[in-house]
Image (tube, coloured by chain):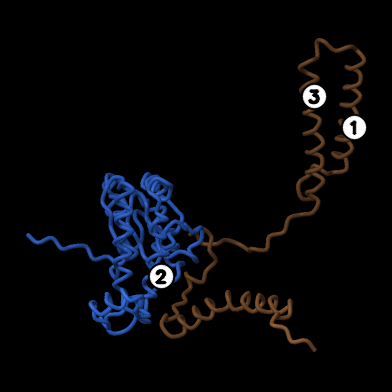
Amino acid sequence: MSEQVDEGVRRELQRQGIWVTSTQELYNWGRRNSIWPLQFGLACCAIEMIATAASRYDIARFGGEVFRPSPRQADLMIVAGTVTKKMAPQIVRLYNQMPDPKYVISMGACAISGGPFKQGYNVLKGIDRYIPVDVYIPGCPPRPEALLHAFMELQRKIDSQRLTGDSKAEHLDPDQPSEFPVPAFGQHDLQPAANPDVFHPPKMER
Amino acid sequence: MVYSMTPNPYFFIVVFCGVALVFPILPLALAWLWRRFFQPSKPGAEKNATYECGVESLGEAQVQFRSQYYLYCIIFLIFDVEAVFLVPFAVAFTGLPVGAFIAILVFLLLLIEGLIWAWSKGCLDWAR
């Protein structure tokens, strides 16, 4: 984890009761163990999210039990369920209103791609068309264990983010935008249909 | 003057006040320093907008209700209580003597008279 201190020396010191750390490590340790999700659910995935928050799966073990009713206090947006085109502008607006650093978990097939409703006229084909997504969890709906796995992946990502240097975290770069344009209701579809700055679908090679 | 190792009993209150000040101010100061040196500020039109569950906010926040609404509430309360009296009366109706019937009728007439009075005063009109 720490590049500054040799791992062997660190462990030796730890055995003597001396804990060596860096500001970055301490900061990321605090950050990854207190991820506050935004409290909202969209469809059946939300039921799995509720189960994850409840006592049997207990997301509090990972520091994520404080579901915030306001985006101002939230670090994480769990897009749990089918995003309809009617709902998409609200999701983007909520994301915009969250303070940096903010993360997004795209939970379930619907939030990733539209899922079983992909052919539907009113379903958004993935929330990553408008906002950047950090972790995708497949499943319909994903089990609470899968959400916990995504949560741990996110913790791993936060742990590896750097505060300084060229490869520092995106939210610390003053040029990186913190909010993205909210799509408007067009005649047949949302306008624009995707944000080209955010949406990078894999190119099909034939 | 007798020298004693025991400090002034009020000394602990001073210590307590000091801790009570430092304890909340220290994290706030650290957060402020952190924002100052690491976190670039990124305000924006959307981010600074009023939070209204994701939808764009409509109209003014300072909406006023007419104070005359209290009359409406009081009248509702009176008839709510009247219903509470009427239900047991209706349930026991067949077994009641004539006196009880007349008593409840007087009670009803009094309330109806009040209703007519309130109506004629215009209390039931919305937003005069």
**In the shown orientation, is residue A14 left or right of residue B126?**
left
Q: Is residue A91 visible?
A: yes
In this view, the mark in front (2 or 3): 2
Mark 1 belongs to chain: B
Amino acid under label 1?
Glu
Q: What is the C-alpha distance between the residues marked 3 and 1?
A: 17 Å
Q: Position of residue A71 (x, y in %)?
A: 48, 63
**Residue at (26% x, 51% y) in the render:** A138
Q: Residue at x 27, y 65 (%)?
A: A199
In the image, what residue type sits under mark 3? Leu
Residue under numbered circle 1: B113
Of the numbered discs 3 and 1, the one sitting upstream in the chain is 3
Q: Which residue corresponds to the image point at 70% horizontal and 79% vertical from the top-left?
A: B6
* Marks 2 and 3 belong to one chain: no
Q: Quadrant of residue B102?
A: top right
Q: CA distance from mark 2 to mark 1?
A: 69 Å
> Relative to residue A63, is residue B92 drawn left or right?
right
Task: Please indicate, yes or no, whether residue A43 appears anywhere in the rendered image.
Answer: no
Asked which secondary structure carries label 3, the reply is helix
Mark seen at residue A30: 2
Q: Position of residue B53 (x, y in %)?
A: 51, 58
| Mark 3 surroundings within 10 Å by alpha-carbon count, few (fewer than 14), some (14 through 19), many (20 or more) | few
